[in-house]
Amino acid sequence: MSPLLHAARPVLIDLAATFLFYGVLAATGNVMLATALGVALGIAQVAVLKLRRTPISAMQWASLGLVLVMGGATLLTRDARFILIKPTIIYAVIGAAMLQRGWMNRYMPPISVGRIPARLVIGAGYAWAGLMFVSAALNLALALTLDPKTVAGVMAAWSPISKIVLFAGQYLLFRHIARRHVLSGAPALEPAH
């Protein structure tokens, strides 16, 4: 697996239900359809992991719980605010989890280990936490002030684009540093903890 795909895959999987929800809502304006599809994808992701006997992280269980509670509340009340606020909670929880020093180690491709200074890996983790908190605040502000279709349109663009820009910048920076490290013949560095 390429280093780029290795690093991007977990992030894309973790955010797939949110991306689907925003995309369907932005395209159709149908809150119920977008909610139902987001809930179905969240359930399907966990079911696939269970069938594969892959460990399911606490974050994935929490995300599924939020999808079920907030999606269920939206479907029962037909009030889009419940499901529109769900991403705010998820972004805030993920941002808080990303404040843990060294969390990015599991996302680093094997080829980069020992080639990227630990302080950069840790700093990039904090940058990701900051992006999650900004996304949470933006989503909440939009959900409380705008109609559901507009919120979905803005967040459907903001969610993937902001993450792709940060990911691409980080990937290119880390790749440049790793290449320089290899070409210099320097010994392996200590990984971030």
Image: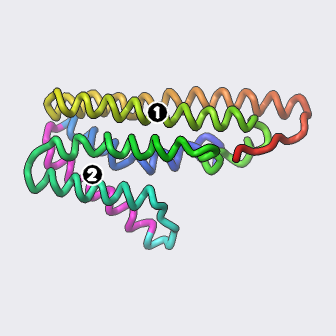
Total residue callouts: 2
| SS label for mark 1 | helix
Q: Residue 145 location, x and y as percent?
A: 17, 27
> Which residue is pictured at 20% across the width and 50% down the height?
35
Instruction: Say the numbered circle drawn on residue 75.
Output: none
Q: Looking at numbered disc 1 in the image, what kind of residue is underneath it?
A: Lys
Q: Can you name the residue that lies furthest to the left here? A: 77
Between 103 and 165, the one nearer to me in the picture: 103
Label ID, residue 163: 1
Q: Quadrant of residue 152?
A: top left
* Residue 153 in the image, given as x and y percentages of width and height: 25, 30
Q: Is residue 37 visible?
A: yes
Question: Viewed as shown, does residue 126 lie left or right of 47?
Answer: right
Q: Can you identify the residue that label 2 sits on?
A: 38
Gap in Å between the C-alphas at discs 2 and 1? 19 Å
Q: Are marks 2 and 1 in contact (CB under 8 Å)?
A: no
Identity of the residue drawn at 90% across and 34% down: 186
User: Type of residue at label 2?
Assistant: Gly
- Count residues near mark 1 (Cα–Cα under 10 Å), then give few for <14, some for 14-19, many for 20+: some
Of the pair 14 and 102, the residue shown nearer to us: 102
Residue located at (54% from left, 41% from top): 99
- Residue 139 pos. (x, y %): 29, 33
Q: Is residue 41 magenta?
A: yes
Residue 44 among magenta residues: yes
Magenta residues (range): 28-49
